[in-house]
Image: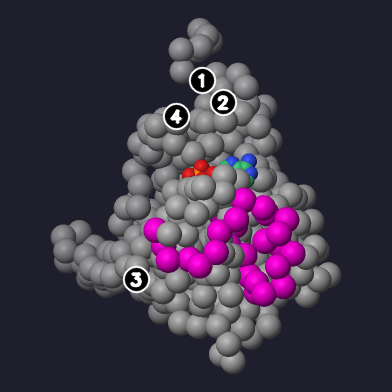
Amino acid sequence: MSRPQRWAVVGTGTISRSAVPDLMACEGVEVTIVHSRDPEKAAAFAAEFGIPRSTGDYAAVVADDSIDAIYLATPIATHHAMTRQALLAGRNVLVEKPIATSAAEAADLFALAADRGVFLMEAMWMKFNPVFRRLRQEIAEGRIGEPRSLRAGFGIPFPEDMGTRFEAGPGGGALLDQGIYPVTLAHALFGEPQSLHAGGVVRPDGVDLAHHVTLEFSQGRFAQCATSMTEFTDLSASVSGPKGWIVLSPPFWATTSLQVRAGSLEAIFVTPEAVDLPREGNGYVPMMREVVEAIEAGLTEHPVHTVADTLSVFRTLDEIRSQLTRTAAPSAGEDVAR
Ligand SMILES: NC(=O)c1ccc[n+]([C@@H]2O[C@H](COP(=O)([O-])OP(=O)(O)OC[C@H]3O[C@@H](n4cnc5c(N)ncnc54)[C@H](OP(=O)(O)O)[C@@H]3O)[C@@H](O)[C@H]2O)c1
């Protein structure tokens, strides 16, 4: 790199605290400024993480020509408008998942990024995880035969005051915050589903608390995904085929190990082959490093998580939301006799 790549961090919440040290650990990166709506919070974050500048003025961040890229880690409902503002100013942007609240919003952002010739990616760190890549490799090598089914769960009873997932409105709910992971995994394995069936629990104000989905692909292949923010569902994932299956240890979206149950009766029924791949930093380093390299290379999208991949997942999320809105059960305590 001719000179360090200069980044701005926007948002000082949970994910920033984990991901920013990993961004700073990447070679050739300087995080030069952090933004919070509250200048004092920004200053405290800057002091804690060794960032030279801080501000409470987002417009000044996006207008700052010394900044090459922005890492946007704010609540989901803000992503579309804040990303739009950064793209219009010609900044490269890495936006926390999900990049937007709908396929239409995401398409609008990617069209704008293409128009301005800047890099834009949803921070889908799962796809850069070494274990996720090992899963792809095991499948490509035919260890389990052609994958036929997936089961994946992301159900955790989160405290109601943690983040904005329990807030009513377009950014709230389990689907966007958590359900995106199982759906992205299904898309990575099988592509876009031909059809899907979704059910779940939706609060009267429209916030989806839990859902289960069957995604159906050609030739009878399927994925079963279960997500909840009020109770646990098994946090592992497994991919199965005619010769065996592979389990991603919980939590599957950030896992450090997988087990291959294939190749012999012993491995299938008794002792699977275990693969352990340690986490780099807090787990975001592989994605951050590749995003930095992509921006340095002048790319406008990343080959690991493309514009087409992202929009395809959003079409599925839109359809799940639409079915949930029509068919979901009332939230706990409001069941009616049927
Ligand atoms: N990749 C992962 O592992 C992972 C994990 C958790 C969350 N996430 C994603 O990261 C994003 C943020 O989640 P989080 O858990 O970090 O949320 P969070 O703890 O609520 O933090 C979000 C930050 O955004 C800022 N903010 C809040 N409301 C805002 C508004 N209306 N306008 C502008 N800024 C606002 C706040 O920072 P200031 O008060 O400093 O302005 C807040 O600290 C979400 O998209 C979430 O899905 C990703």
* Distance Cα–Cα, label 1 vs label 4: 15 Å
Residue located 61% across and 83% down the image: 296
Among numbered discs 3 and 1, the one appearing first in the sequence: 3
| Viewport quadrant of the N terminus | bottom right
Provide the residue designation for mark 2.
202
Mark 2 CB within 8 Å of ligand 1:
no
Density class for disc 1 (Cα within 10 Å; few <14, some 14-19, many ≥20) is: some
Provide the residue designation for mark 4.
160
Tag 3 and tag 1, C-beta contact below 8 Å: no
Q: What element carries label 2?
A: strand
For the residue marked with disc 3, what is the amino acid? Glu
Provide the residue designation for mark 1.
331
The answer to which image quadrant residue 184 occupies is: bottom right
Provide the residue designation for mark 3.
280
Density class for disc 3 (Cα within 10 Å; few <14, some 14-19, many ≥20) is: some
Tag 1 and tag 4, C-beta contact below 8 Å: no
Tag 1 and tag 2, C-beta contact below 8 Å: yes
Give the magenta-colored segment's residue range: 48-73
Q: Between 191 and 37, which is closer to the camera in this rendering?
A: 37
* Distance Cα–Cα, label 4 vs label 2: 15 Å
x, y (%) of residue 94? Answer: 60, 64
Residue located 55% across and 41% down the image: 175
Among numbered discs 2 and 3, the one appearing first in the sequence: 2
Among numbered discs 4 and 3, the one appearing first in the sequence: 4
Q: Is residue 60 magenta?
A: yes
Residue located 68% across and 54% down the image: 58
For the residue marked with disc 1, what is the amino acid? Ser
Q: Between 285 and 308, which is closer to the camera in this rendering?
A: 285
